[in-house]
Amino acid sequence: MSEEEKSVAEDVVVEETAAPQKKRKKWPIVVGVVAAVVIVAGAGFWVWHEQPSFCNAICHTPMDAYLPTYEAELDQACIDKWGNEVTNSRAMMAPLHRAEADNATCLSCHVPTLSEQISEGINWVSGNYEVLHTQAGLAVPTERTLEDLVAARGLEPDQFCLNESCHNMTREDLANATSDMKRNPHIGQHGEVACGECHKAHRASVMYCSNCHNDAEVPDGWITAAEDKKLVKQLEEGK
């Protein structure tokens, strides 16, 4: 074999032995890129997970009627989760908290436990949940009480609103805050009334006192107890 042939053969051997080494060197880069993509995607997904649009798109079906109530512009007329007009969106706690409570999201109020998430996930997949059909042709889950919302967390109904992260006050503080009203709704003259009896998140809040007192002051956008009963009856008859 000539010197030239030997040189060519040696070059071939070098290339053949070097190729696997080059391939092995690419693996750390590929793994790094994949890991970076996963981390970025995971971070983006987690940020989205905190937004109402995630709840509407992924987990809770049907939720289409709820998102517009959260996004309603404050102090404007809007539509509630049942398709009824609300003369002032401030009467609904969802848009009010979004605008005035540091952009509160669904998870600011609805804090699920792992067991609750698993249970709701199973119900969602199996379709094991009851819905009511609204005037707008949408189907919404039946309304839950504060007792329902805090049961999995082992809290008392009052703790849903009256806690260090939200309204850090007592019922006595509430009574003092509304002492200028003709009929103070926070004085428990007839026993304690759950916050949710009056304050509604995705529909117009209800002046509970108007059940008995015709002169009870009804805030702008709120409805009377009689109007509330009429709405609920219409909804139940149309389900």
Image: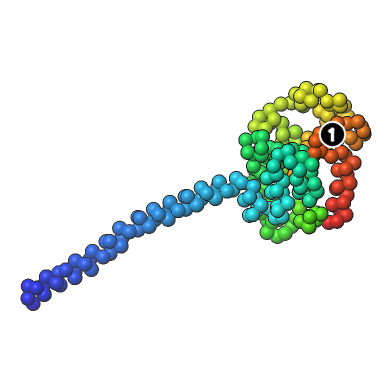
Residue assigned mark 1: 218
- Residue 214: where, in percent of width, then height? 92, 33
Residue at (7% x, 76% y) in the render: 2
Q: Is residue 161 above or below residue 121?
A: above
The quadrant of the picture occupied by the N terminus is bottom left
Q: How many numbered discs sit on the rendered protein?
A: 1
- Horizontal side, residue 107 vs residue 201: left or right: left
Nearer to me, 71 or 226: 71
**Residue under the point 75% across and 45% down:** 78
Where in the figure is residue 172, as x and y percent of width and height?
77, 23
Residue count near mark 1 (Cα–Cα under 10 Å), binned few <14, some 14–19, many ≥20: some
Residue 92 in sight here: no
The residue depicted at 63 percent of the width and 38 percent of the height is: 103
Residue 209 visible in the shown view: yes
User: Whole-percent x and y of residue 46?
Assistant: 55, 47
Left or right of 163? Residue 40 is left
Residue type indicated by callout 1: Val
